[in-house]
Amino acid sequence: MNHGDNGHPFLAVHRLQGERIHALLKSNNVLHSHISPVEHEGDFIAFPLLDVDFSASLKNDISAITNLPVHVIKRIPHVMDEVDPHTRLQSVVKDWLTRLVSQKQSPEIQPFIDALPKKWERLGELVLFPSGSFSQEIWTAFSSEDRSELWRDIASVLNVTSIGIQSPIANDAVRSSQATVLLGTSLVKFIDHGIHYEFDAAKVMFSSGNVTERRRIGAMDMSGETVVDAFAGVGYYSFPMLIKAGATHVHACEMNPPSIDGLVRGAEANGIEDRITVHQGNNQESLPKLKRIADRCHLGLLPSSEAAWGLCLQALKSEGGWLHVHMNVKEEEISDWKRKTIEQFQSLSDRMELGFTIRGDHLERVKWYAPYVRHVVYDIECRPERS
């Protein structure tokens, strides 16, 4: 592995592979947590390393993802964080407790540190902590005024203006967000790899964990294509397909009013409002109006998009096209699910006399959705039967 004498060792990879490599380096304890990743030569991102002497298995894993040997490690300029954000969070809580000593008996600090959330999601100027954070009695025993002071301190050290607590996704047809805002506003604006998003995070769910799939979809060649996005949300996949993949037009189906508002705002912010048609309401009513117009359909609903499978088949042009089917599947059942899914799509095509031959192409394991359950996306090709 070649590197110079100055600076710090980094591993530079294409940004489309960034999240997978980041997770791999972190799980193998070679990622330096106190140095920030840096942009590198345009489309590359470089991750700081604790050690350049990788195990053979880690080298093989990295090479399998990047299709490059691991000697792409380079020493490049970097930014050293003063401390990592978890340490900053702990420090501000200790300071907050110390300031309260003169007003009431000082509590033992360690239980508060142990109760702090270990992760959070940042959406622009808003940080959302996981459901249940700061809900224990050790926090609620303080007055609302004392806690408001803590929220302001936390926002300051995490360099945001708003903070909130995520709640379980609502058990409704649109999987609404139920986040509670502790400080500031739930209205967010941010740029994710060159794409603008705008929405109300208290009313709309946005999963940062799906970034690899958004990048993968955006890296496809959809030049000249018309796409139907059956579950568009705030443009999670519609925008990458238009802006990155080069689709000519997207028909975006969405029934949740706050999501529609975010979809429209985002389209305007990205300057693509003339290339996206928003179909408001239940897609069981909007999809039948889109027959034979699509080169591909995106079915991005979890835990299952099955209710729209037949309608999306009908939306494909007579010359066929592609389906991108999202689903939650138990890891040990993925192979069986792939087979049954192709069989089901073939049965639907035959029953509706569409004349397609259905072929499974690629299955992407996006992330773990729950213990032993994967969020997967199956790319399926549908073409006219050959006589």
Image (tube, helix red, strand yellow):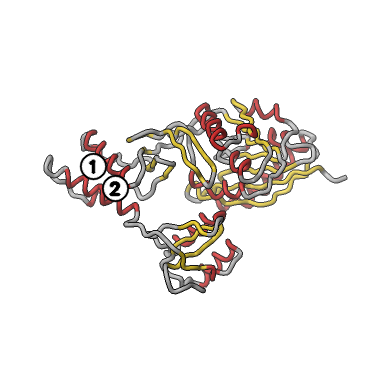
SS label for mark 2? helix
Q: Nearer the viewer, residue 376 or 74?
A: 74
Give the image quarter of residue 133. top left
Lower position in the chain sequence, tag 2 or tag 1: 2
List x then y, in percent, for residue 312. Answer: 69, 35
CB-based contact (under 8 Å), mark 2 and mark 1: yes
Q: Viewed as shown, does residue 253 lie left or right of 293?
A: left
Q: Residues within 10 Å of mark 1 (few under 14, many from 20)?
A: few
Residue hosting label 2: 115
Label 1 element class: helix
Q: Residue at x 77, y 33 (%)?
A: 352
**Measuring 67% from the left and 46% from the top, which residue is drawn there?**
340
Between 171 and 39, which is closer to the camera in this rendering?
39
> Residue 122: x, y in percent?
42, 44
Q: Residue at x 68, y 42 (%)?
A: 323
Q: Tell whether 297 sits left or right of 265.
A: right
Q: Amino acid at mark 2?
A: Ala
Q: Which mark is drawn over residue 348?
A: none
- Please give the name of the residue rendered at 78% of the width and 44% of the height, measured from the top-left corner: 383
Label 2, label 1: how far apart the Cα atoms are: 9 Å
**Labelled disc at residue 138:** 1
Quadrant for residue 7, please give it: bottom left
Amino acid bearing label 1: Ile
Q: Position of residue 325 (x, y in %)?
A: 63, 43
